[in-house]
Amino acid sequence: MLRFDDTSSDDQIAKLHEKEEEDFLQIMSKKYGIPYADLSGVPVDMTAVGLIKEDLARAALIAPFELANKKLKVALFSPMQANTKEVLTSLAERGYNIEQYLVSHASLEKVWERYHEISGATKSEAGMVDISGENMDGLVKKFTTLEDVTKALKTTVTEKTARHISNIFSTVMAGAIGIHASDIHIEPAEDSIHIRYRIDGVLHEVATLPSGIYRLFSSRLKLLAGLKLNVGTESQDGRFSIKISGMEIEMRVSVIPGAYGEGVVMRILNPESLDVTLEDLGMSPRLLEIVDREIKKPHGMILNTGPTGSGKTTTLYAFLKRIYSSEIKMMTIEDPIEYHLKGVSQTQVGEEKGYTFLEGLRSAMRQDPDVIMIGEIRDGETAKVAINAALTGHMVFSTLHTNTAAGAIPRLIDLGVTPKVIGSSLTVALAQRLARKLCDECKKEDTPNEREQKIIDDVSAIIKEKVGEDMQTKKLWRAVGCVKCNNTGYRGRVGLFEAVLMTAEIEALLDAIPSEREIREIAKKQGLLNMREDGIEKILAGLTSFDEVERVVDLEPAE
């Protein structure tokens, strides 16, 4: 009888046909008390496969093939091999409860052949996955325009190499980072995959790939992001990181089922995007002076309002960076933590675990903070605790989903905050949008049409009355498009702002629960530009175009 511990066992088994090997292993499974398995019809869990490197798995004749929580099913050829035992011990030490199955070489090969789907992925110390291959730095530097990425993908798709999918994946990632995209959209259609990048707030088509590569592409992405590979009928969220020149760029992944496959959106959190000062935001000189003064006060509340993607969090981060000092304790409660700030204690809420903004804020209050940033005020209880924090010696920064600065006060009242305490705590309410900046390489001077001229004349008169500034009103600039700006006519973005200051006049109105319109009328006396006026000022200064401002702000006069 053949024995696994016989020195001749390998030679004897090698002479058997595949069927005989399967029969033999069924007999040996009874001897060793290890169940036999034929993996020819068993789905392979790529998350399990990725727990062991391919060279180690082949050397030890072992293959993890299913993982549920910490329960790991492992296929092996011989329980007596020393290196097999070492791998099993290592997996057990990592906390996995192992179920062993005796399988043939053919079954092992079925699992091993899946390694080509995940080549290049390695676990990082933080528990995420890093793409840090030698070529990533070079790839990122190679891509400066959308056209560069499109051409590279067309070439990569036609490759006939073992790293075909890995190269496509790396090209998509490196291209997005190289041309400063904020998001990657991967959208399966009936017979193709559409890849788009969001650049300066607008989506651009990058490439259309054959649908045949999507399963392998999706498997690699899911493995990297720590998602379930065998689930395609429910949404999943994950993350991974890419290391470029020693800098870690985090990728937030959202997967959602669709008619032709799972749609994917990846948010790129590039630390370089955080390198924004208060002056870089685009505030008018007077508003900048006011904000700079108010954020340095020992207590109070400053709210920033606007829709998703309007730059609110970046502005709050700029506040924190401006006032940072080793002499004060600064804390943030975020969902999720978008960027890591040096010297700031950051905590991430998790609604599914019951750790809400409210719980995070209450916990932060017990940490003796001086400054607290709350990612978003979503409910009445959080609003009340935040207001109370501002009243009890803390500086609080947060965001609200309202369209205007004047709308922040009625929104707080709607959330159940007592009007009187709003006047004692809120110091400034801001609202902002992001407009694309004209490309300096190709923008073209132009003459306004009749409608544009009327709006410009009306707004310029208001600006002169408010700030005493005469503006040229007879020319503006249009977007043209060149290689430098990916033929869009725009490069980068600038903020459009408005603000309402808490004054005695507004505070006196609060008990009567004023409307947004009433607050807006009083705020006109404060001499600050509203968003419409700020937009026109930036148009006439040549920073952006009329069309672009009108994309994010209503330029028609308010009724």
Image: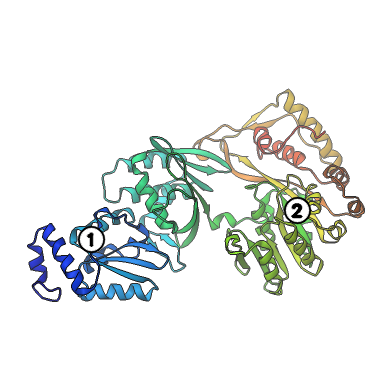
Q: Which residue is mark 1?
A: 108
| Label 2 Cα neighbours within 10 Å, binned few <14 / some 14-19 / many ≥20 | some
Q: Could you tell which of marks 2 and 1 lies nearer the N-terminus? A: 1
**Closest to the observer, 203 or 113:** 113
Q: Which residue is mark 2?
A: 288
Q: Residue type at mark 1? A: Leu
Q: Percent x, y for residue 180?
A: 51, 48
Looking at the image, can residue 137 be seen? no
For the N terminus, the quadrant is bottom left
Looking at the image, can residue 405 be seen? yes
Image-based side of 260 in relation to 440, left or right: left
**Closest to the observer, 295 or 471:** 295
* 216 over 28 or under it: above or below: above
Q: Secondary structure at mark 2?
A: helix
* 340 over 412 or under it: above or below: below
Kindly indicate the quadrant of the structure image that contains residue 130: bottom left
Q: Percent x, y for residue 95?
A: 40, 73
Residue appearing at x 77%, y 48% in the figure: 405
Q: Percent x, y for residue 544?
A: 65, 38
Residue appearing at x 32%, y 61% in the figure: 49
Residue appearing at x 58%, y 59% in the figure: 336
